[in-house]
Image (spheres, helix red, strand yellow):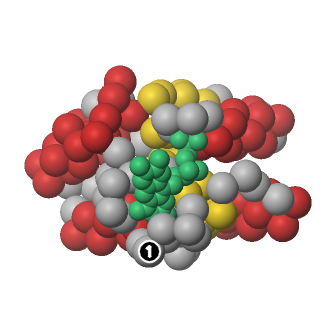
Amino acid sequence: MEEIKVIYASMSGRNQHLAEYVNNFLTTKGYPVINEEISQSDAFTLADYKKVILISYTYHDGDLPDEALDFYDDLNDVDLTGVEFALIGSSSTTHEHFGRALDRYFKRLTAKQATVIAAPVKIDRDPQATDYQRIDALLNALLAD
Ligand SMILES: Cc1cc2nc3c(=O)[nH]c(=O)nc-3n(C[C@H](O)[C@H](O)[C@H](O)COP(=O)(O)O)c2cc1C
């Protein structure tokens, strides 16, 4: 089966945990997974994949994590035609711009001809059982076609 890329940004561990959950979900179904922390991930290789899962917290005032900025800038210079993305992130409703980093990715990825398969799954801090169900549904949609 085709390799699926999972890229995550995490400062205090929640999104790293979500990346591990996603990895387990995919490998249990038999998909090979490449798992990368975002500062180690090369946006120029994204077009080599058919399916990518991007997992990120939101920082500052509704912005991307600092360690994601190079990756995000490089997205300007790639053509992602034919690549499907799913966006997931734990952030916090205590902040004004809840999970807005995911909205930024949504806009940029679609501007670069990627297909973002659904609205981002935004999770308030620690994931609950219903959040895992939302993640499962998103991943099943990503795998469906
Ligand atoms: C300084 C700071 C700024 C933050 N700003 C936002 C924000 O603007 N919007 C938001 O939804 N969450 C914000 N958060 C919350 C984090 O995104 C949230 O705690 C997230 O679960 C952290 O994920 P991690 O454990 O993977 O690092 C902020 C957290 C900190 C410490």
Residue at image point 61% right, 34% down: 13
Residue at image point 17% right, 43% down: 74
Q: Position of residue 103 (x, y in %)?
A: 39, 70
Asked if residue 100 lies left or right of residue 15, the reply is left
Q: Nearer the viewer, residue 94 or 106?
A: 94
Vertical arrangement, residue 97 with respect to residue 60, above or below: below
Label 1, secondary structure: give it.
loop
Q: Position of residue 95 (x, y in %)?
A: 48, 68
Inspect this view and state whether residue 105 appears: no
Residue at image point 77% right, 63% down: 131
Residue extending furthest toward the left: 77
The quarter holding residue 37 reads top left
Q: Which residue is mark 1?
A: 96
Asked if residue 139 lies left or right of residue 30, the reply is left
The quarter holding residue 136 reads bottom right
Q: Position of residue 137 (x, y in %)?
A: 75, 66
